[in-house]
Image (cartoon, rainbow, N blue to C red):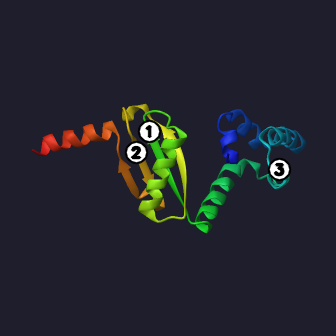
Amino acid sequence: EPLPAYRAPTPAMSTFLSNPTMEGKNKKDVLAKLGKEASFHPFTSNFLNLLVDKSRIGQLDAIAEEFESLYCAQTDTQVATVTSAVKLENEQQFMIAKKIQEMTGAKNIKLKPEVDPSLLGGFVVTYGKDGSGYIDMSVAGQVKQLKNDIVVA
């Protein structure tokens, strides 16, 4: 999992790491425990310690986001967000990723699953540069389309 995924569930950790009054040693201790628990590669742990030393640990999310963007560009990886009414199974995610790969011709697809119960059923996929590609297979989208069709007729 990407590093921000370990920080997201605990906003207190982000606050702690971003706090300039906390000593670097304390931050490094917390990061060492997290690294051990999450089985971070030594390069990752060293990088996090460097960010603490240079007082840049508060910018970790932005750094991770930019790294992911550069990595995806370098490896011809298309990032797609799939929003569904319920959590999708791994096989369903794989099928969606495979279809997007066929549509875009990208070498790899990185799927970011999200859940939005207001979709009622089905899913919505956004992909491409700045989310320019959009596929709406949701019940809410079909209801909206049906409503538009009735209003036009």
Q: Badge 2: how crowded within 10 Å, few (<14), some, or many (20+)?
A: many
In the displayed structure, 107 sits above or below 85; it is: below
Q: Are marks 3 and 1 in contact (CB under 8 Å)?
A: no
Q: Earlier in the sequence, mark 3 or mark 1?
A: 3
Q: Which mark is residue 124?
A: 2
* Residues at marks 1 and 2, CA–CA distance in whole angstroms: 6 Å
In the image, taking residue 1 as reference, residue 122 lies left or right, namely left
Q: Are marks 1 and 2 in contact (CB under 8 Å)?
A: yes
The answer to which of 103 and 132 lies nearer the viewer is 103
Which residue position holds label 3?
Answer: 45
* Residues at marks 3 and 2, CA–CA distance in whole angstroms: 36 Å
Picture coordinates of residue 42, whole percent (x, y) = 85, 52
Q: Earlier in the sequence, mark 1 or mark 2?
A: 1
The answer to which of 136 and 131 lies nearer the viewer is 136
Q: Amino acid at mark 3?
A: Ser
Which residue position holds label 1?
Answer: 84
Picture coordinates of residue 35, whole percent (x, y) = 81, 43
The answer to which of 13 and 22 lies nearer the viewer is 13
Residue 99 quadrant: bottom left
* Residues at marks 3 and 1, CA–CA distance in whole angstroms: 34 Å
Q: Earlier in the sequence, mark 3 or mark 2?
A: 3
Identify the secondary structure beneath mark 2.
strand
Q: Amino acid at mark 2?
A: Val
**Picture residue at 65% right of the left edge, 34% below the top:** 9
In the image, taking residue 6 as reference, residue 125 lies left or right, namely left
Picture coordinates of residue 100, whole percent (x, y) = 45, 56
